[in-house]
Structures are given as structure tokens and as C-alpha cells.
Amino acid sequence: MELHKESDISCSSAAEHYLIELMNEIKIFSPATVANVSCGFDVMGFCLDNVGDEMVIRKIDKKGIYITKVENFDLPFETELNVAGVSALAMYEAIDVDFGFEIEIYKNIKPGSGIGSSAASAVGSVFGMNELIGRPFNKTQLTEFAMKGEALASKCEHADNLAPALFGGFTLVKSIAPLKILQIPSPEDLYATIIHPQIEVKTSESRAILPNEVPLNKAITQWANLGSLIHALHTSDYDLIQDSLNDVVVEPYRSQLIPLFNEVKDVSLKAGALGAGISGSGPSIFTLSKGLEQANKVKEAMQSVYETSEIDFDIHVSKINTQGVKIIG
């Protein structure tokens, strides 16, 4: 297991977490995320700031993992059938304790929305458990546990949503075996606008529509865009970000599953967005903008498209969240 740029705990932070270890429960915020970021299919993602689930993780005398509350959406209480439960079980098997954990899930990210709903559940349970037992695992190890839960939802182990939820900011999954996650700087004035049309796009369907082979010229364009985007984020080059947010491999196929996608993208770019694309497997559509004022202008343009349709939608403007999952109580 490899790790990149994962900082040690400071003395004050260590004392704080010692006190948390003495506590029996913790409340956390587990954020929504955007995966792929146009040209980074299955390897890149970023973390949102004001959209996410809340979870309570509690120590109990009885050994095992138990889902005791799920609010807002109809998700299974059976531990082995719940994403948060499966990731928690993976971690629980790696520790030797004489107690168990209860998990309460206050689900604010709609399942199937394309902004990392299952990842938020998978990350939240292992993060909370880790805090309550004194942080024996680092973020990369927590990602590995969370991948087991994510696989329950998507039928394969991947970390493009999990990594930004745990590390915050932009992340690149360099490799899965061994797991290596790279943290990418986030330009200070970068904002995301996300619109979620209230339709369902199943991950299995969105993967099935993709071709098994990619022409070499498109592959070259795609990895050039990804390399340019990484450089642009490191240098806060907004013009290069704009020039790099282009997906020639996945978007042409998946966009067919999202009503009005091309119209939303077109008006967003005309309104001044740096770029627009599909968030994860959809149906959410993300844009990136320089500055909050510009992001709000893009919001107005995006929602104007769906307001003329019969499709309900949610829309959010968010600064890039550089912290990731966090304690809120």
C-alpha cells in the first residue's frame, strides 16, 4: 500500500483525537464528490463543500456492525447489503476489539445522482470508526476499506469518488493495486456548479454503453487533456483548465442517457463556465467556474434549461472542499 503527501497528526490534533477515542459516538459530514472530471475517467475526482450526508457512528458493547437508522431514502438495514455496512465490516475484520459499532445514516445525497452517494456512505462509516479508535489507519488504508462498500454499489472496486471524499480537493488514483492516491492542488477561486435532473441513470447501464476499444487518436487527445488539467490545477492556470476539460472518450456515449445534456453544456459555456461535463455516471452535470459570481451566473443558465422542461432538478454551487469528510459533533 503506497501513500502520497499524507501528513502526520500534529501534537494538538493527536490530543484532540485521544479525547475522541474516549468518547462513545461521533457525528460526521461525508461530502458529495464529482468523479471523472471530464478527461479523468475512473481516476480523477474532486470534493464538494456544502452537499453531503451526515452519519453518527457509535461504540456499543455488542460485537459487530449494525445499521440502526436510515433517513430520507429507503436503504437496507442489513449490514451486508448496505454500502456503509460493507465498508465498515472490511475495517472491522482488520481490528481486534471487544466491542462493536452502530451506524446512523442521514442520507442527503440521493442514490444514483452521480455525485458520489454510495462513496459518501462507504467513507463515512470507516472514517467515523477510525476516529473513535484513535486513528490507527491512514486515509489510503481507509480508502481500501471503503472500496469494498463501493463495489457493492457499482459492481467493481474503484476510488475516483472515495479518494476526494477522504482526502478533500482534487485527487488522482494513480493505481489500485497497490492503491496509490495523489493529492492535486485546488486553485483558490475555483467553484463548481452541479445540476441534478431527477431521473435515474444506473451505473451498470452507463458502463454498458461504453465501447470496449478506443481509437488511438482519441486516446492521445484524452490523456493529453488529463495531463494538461493536472498541470493547470498545480499552476492555477484557469485558461488551461478551460482548454483541458474535454472528454472525447466517455461523454459522447453517456450524454445520450441524460436529457438536455448538450443544451445545458452549451448555455453553461456561453455563460462563462470553464468547462462542463457529466458527474460520475450521471445524470448530474458539473461545471467549473472562476469565482463565485461566475458560478452563480452559470447556475442561472443551467437551471433555465430544465425550467422549460417537465424534469425536476436540484442545483448547487460549491467551492472545492479541500478538507473532505469531517467531524461535526
Image (cartoon, rainbow, N blue to C red):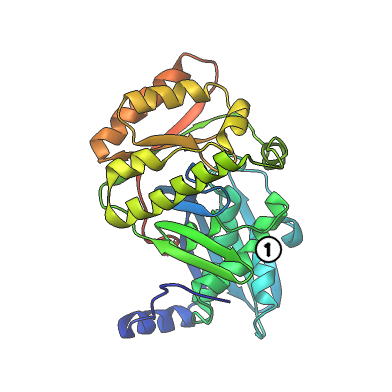
Q: Is residue 170 left or right of residue 150?
A: left
Q: Looking at the rendering, which quadrant does residue 4 occupy?
A: bottom left
Q: In the figure, 157 relative to 312: above or below?
A: below
Q: Residue 315: x percent and y percent?
A: 43, 33
Q: In the figure, 27 relative to 138: above or below?
A: above
Residue at horizontal 38 percent and vertical 83 percent from the top: 14
Q: Residue 142: x percent and y percent?
A: 56, 70
Q: Identify residue for label 1.
A: 148
Q: Residue 321: x percent and y percent?
A: 37, 54
Residue at horizontal 54 percent and vertical 16 percent from the top: 310
Q: Looking at the rendering, which quadrant does residue 120 occupy?
A: bottom right
Element class at badge 1:
helix
Q: Is 59 in front, or is 208?
A: 208
Q: Is residue 23 left or right of residue 186?
A: right
Residue at horizontal 38 percent and vertical 22 percent from the top: 267
Q: Is 146 in front, or is 241?
A: 241
Given the image, on which type of amino acid does mark 1 rest?
Lys
Mark 1 residue crowding within 10 angstroms, few (<14) / some (14–19) / many (20+): many
Check the picture and name the quadrant holding the N terminus. Answer: bottom right
**Residue closest to the far top:** 308
Q: In the figure, 170 relative to 128: above or below?
A: above
| Visible residue check, residue 284 | yes
Q: Is residue 29 left or right of residue 291?
A: right
